[in-house]
Image (tube, grey):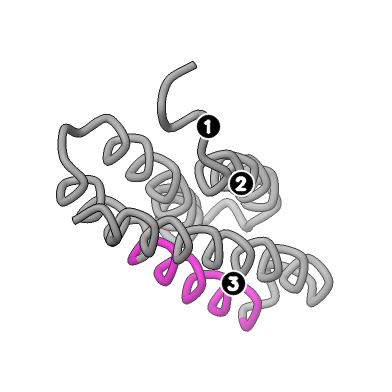
Amino acid sequence: MKPHQRLDAWKKGIEFTIRIYAVTEEFPKHEVFGLTAQLRRASVSIPNNIAEGAGRNTSKEFLHFLFISRGSLSEVDTLLIIARRLKYISIERYDELNRLLDFISKLLSGLINSVRTKL
């Protein structure tokens, strides 16, 4: 198993990304190159940067990519708020995605704290 595949934050990030792809299938077609693309890209960036960081040689490099992942998480949060206000997603779906995003945020913060202790 590759190092990143053992990380809960990465696993939940993959799960979240799959959900985002499903949700954005229902967005208006005129958003394909707008909100849909941005939301997908930002959600993919969460587990992708965790994986890239885990594959690096030092804790400092890993931490750098974890911070990028956290930035992408904030970007997804903002994009979901916009999608909700545009009524592209229901309040129930928004709440579900937001809970998962909060959970990933906690996992990511724990991972960041763990890596920081190794510096």
Quarter of the picture containing the C terminus is bottom left
Our reading of the magenta stretch's main secondary structure is helix
* Mark 2: amino acid: Lys
Which residue carries the number 3 mark?
Answer: 83
- Are the residues flagged by discs 2 and 3 in contact, CB closer than 8 Å? no
Percent of width and height locating residue 24: 62, 51
**Helix or strand or loop: what does disc 3 sit on?**
helix
Distance of label 1 from label 2 (alpha carbons): 11 Å
Which comes sooner in the sequence, label 1 or label 3? 1
Q: Are marks 1 and 2 in contact (CB under 8 Å)?
A: no
Disc 1 marks which residue? 6
Residue 76 drawn in magenta: yes
**In the rendered image, which residue does mark 2 sit on?**
12
Image position of 71 (left or right of 88): left
Residues rendered magenta in the picture: 71-85
Q: Residue at x 16, y 51 (%)?
A: 60
